[in-house]
């Protein structure tokens, strides 16, 4: 990064140092890209509103070797759809279920990881304006020491539902405003029984013991419209609402924090507008039911990171960056639809009881539970595959223990470098030699792994798989199909020489690096 007068230059500006922005920053650094992360808050809040990671998020963390950094985790086998509980562990993943990890721990882990990789994370820096030209994005930023201007080829807004990036860049954000809301608080010093979506005559209540003497409570009074709020609700509002619904007095408790969230639903019409992109809550606003928002945003960061790095590095195929919107916007739309359906079931009064009873019957069926569990876990996402394509094409690569020419490994461990992986299961020497010679032209972007014996779970008709850096399958050889077209489609034209890959980035992160004089 260089300083030119009042202008500082980098390659990507990420606005927002929540989990999504930090995940994206790490992915960009693995791709060899300089990145500055701007965060308005001077320090993390320490609050943990989102505390649930799904199976696909755990897989993505495993792909980058991040699971051990999370520390102790607690798995829950039960999920819900609109408050109707069902087992979510019957899915094909190494991490079935939901994993309870406080958001502040996830955020701290990602900040440490991105920082070690060399991301320049600047807290107490608030974006004020963005100016886009044909070649650059210029961002005006205020901080405690004054102001600065950053310039980069791209900026990504990961700055939440009130995104400054989305607003100043003029993204359309259609949808509906909040009509009903839940009050939520972490409270110390109360003794109420745990409740999971308990419906009373006057409303819905939830209570769950957290660590220490903390209880998280949520409530909604049936038929009550959402208020126009400029500040968080007072604890007294929670106390009186809880008493009206349950008859219990929690006024002796001490709130750690209190907030309100509602059923507003908005979705950016586009995730990319030229040199400006959106991810996480900046791109979609939904009621936080089942931890969908955080996981959705992390999956977007994994999808976008390697593509944007390729674009900046200059080897991306023409439409690679546009595939971010093409792949992730439908996933976001489907998630918002599902959340809206759950909100109707969860917050509706007596009028929704017949529908809840019918859905409860359906949840007794294995196929229904499996379908909803895969959807809630983020495991059923398939990119760009048509009706006649192999069912593995576009799907995520499952974890497989492998014995390769280089020794024992796994399909997950091979993704640690954030490069593509070509897994060759073929026993045909001539075909293997031809495929190896072809893949060698992309060796700086794709790792060729010769698998000595076919692992369990890989269908016998599959001779090779090309896996993208985000863990999704880009090409399936179920005969003798040519891999060159797929390599060009996802990894650009073959280029001689060696590019900067993850091993170099990790080494560089331990060396002194240029400072911008923060």
Image (cartoon, rainbow, N blue to C red):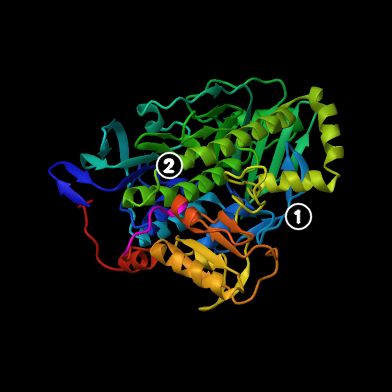
Q: Which residue is the site of mark 2?
A: 319
| Label pair 2/1, CB-CB below 8 angstroms | no
Q: Residue at x 72, y 54 (%)?
A: 91
Residue 474 in view in this figure = yes
Q: Residue at x 44, y 53 (%)?
A: 488
Relative to 137, is 234 on the left or the right? right
Residue farthest along the front direction in this orientation: 430
- Foreground residue, 264 or 210? 264
Which image quadrant is residue 368 in? Answer: top right
Residue 46 in view in this figure = no
Q: Earlier in the sequence, mark 2 or mark 1?
A: 1
Q: Which residue is the site of mark 1?
A: 90
Q: Using the image, determine if residue 485 lies above or below residue 414.
A: above
Q: Using the image, determine if residue 167 lies above or below residue 13.
A: above
**Residue 276: image location, x then y, percent:** 37, 36
**Residue 317: image location, x then y, percent:** 40, 47
Q: Residue at x 42, y 33 (%)?
A: 163
**Residue 200: image location, x then y, percent:** 79, 31
The question of residue 32 being in magenta is answered with: no
Relative to 418, is 457 on the left or the right? right
Q: Using the image, determine if residue 176 lies above or below residue 13.
A: above
Q: Residue at x 51, y 23 (%)?
A: 174
Q: Report the span colored magenta.
A: 490-496
- Foreground residue, 131 or 114? 131
* Secondary structure of residue under mark 1: loop
* Secondary structure of residue under mark 2: loop
**10 Å neighbourhood of mark 2: few (<14), some, or many (≥20)?**
few
Q: Nearer the viewer, mark 2 or mark 1?
A: 2
């Amino acid at each position: 990064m260089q300083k030119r007068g009042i202008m500082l230059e980098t390659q990507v500006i990420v606005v927002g140092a929540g989990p999504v922005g930090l995940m994206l920053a790490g992915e960009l650094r693995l791709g060899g890209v300089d990145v500055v992360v701007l965060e308005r808050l001077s320090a993390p809040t320490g609050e943990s509103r989102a505390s649930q990671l799904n199976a696909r998020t755990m897989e993505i963390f495993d792909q980058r070797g991040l699971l051990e950094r999370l520390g102790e985790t607690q798995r829950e086998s039960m999920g819900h759809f609109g408050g109707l509980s069902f087992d979510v562990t019957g899915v094909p993943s190494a991490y079935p279920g939901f994993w309870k990890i406080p958001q502040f721990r996830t955020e701290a882990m990602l900040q440490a990881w991105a920082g070690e990789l060399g991301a320049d994370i600047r807290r107490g820096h608030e974006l004020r304006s963005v100016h886009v030209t044909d070649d650059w994005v210029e961002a005006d930023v205020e901080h405690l020491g004054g102001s600065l201007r950053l310039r980069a080829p791209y900026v990504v807004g990961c700055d939440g539902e009130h995104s400054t990036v989305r607003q100043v860049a003029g993204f359309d954000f259609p949808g509906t405003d909040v009509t009903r809301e839940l009050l939520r608080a972490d409270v110390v010093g109360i003794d109420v029984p745990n409740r999971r979506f308990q419906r009373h005559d006057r409303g819905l209540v939830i209570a769950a013991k957290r660590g220490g003497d903390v209880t998280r409570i949520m409530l909604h009074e049936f038929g009550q419209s959402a208020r126009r709020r400029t500040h968080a609700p007072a604890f007294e509002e929670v106390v009186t609402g809880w008493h009206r619904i349950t008859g219990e007095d929690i006024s002796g408790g001490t709130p750690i924090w209190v907030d309100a969230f509602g059923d507003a639903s908005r979705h950016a019409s586009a995730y990319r507008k030229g040199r400006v992109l959106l991810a996480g809550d900046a791109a979609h606003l939904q009621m936080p039911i089942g931890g969908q928002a955080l996981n959705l945003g992390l999956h977007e960061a994994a999808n976008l990171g390697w593509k944007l790095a390729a674009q900046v590095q200059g080897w991306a195929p023409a439409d690679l960056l546009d595939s971010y919107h093409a792949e992730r916007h439908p996933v976001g739309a489907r998630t918002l639809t599902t959340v809206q359906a759950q909100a109707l079931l969860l917050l509706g009064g007596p009028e929704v009881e017949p529908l809840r009873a019918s859905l409860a019957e359906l949840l007794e069926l294995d196929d229904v539970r499996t379908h909803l569990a895969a959807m809630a876990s983020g495991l059923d996402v398939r990119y760009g595959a048509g009706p006649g394509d192999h069912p593995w094409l576009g799907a995520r690569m499952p974890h497989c223990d492998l014995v390769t020419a280089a020794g024992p490994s796994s399909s997950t461990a091979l993704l640690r470098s954030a490069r593509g992986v070509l897994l060759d299961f073929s026993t045909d020497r001539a075909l293997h030699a031809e495929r190896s010679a072809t893949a060698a032209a992309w060796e700086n972007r794709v790792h060729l792994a010769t698998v000595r014996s076919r692992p369990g779970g890989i269908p016998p008709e599959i001779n090779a798989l090309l896996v993208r850096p985000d863990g999704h399958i880009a090409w399936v050889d179920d005969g003798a199909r040519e891999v060159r077209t797929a390599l060009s489609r996802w990894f650009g034209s073959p280029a001689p020489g060696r590019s900067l890959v993850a091993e170099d980035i990790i080494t560089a992160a331990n060396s002194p690096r240029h400072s911008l004089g923060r």
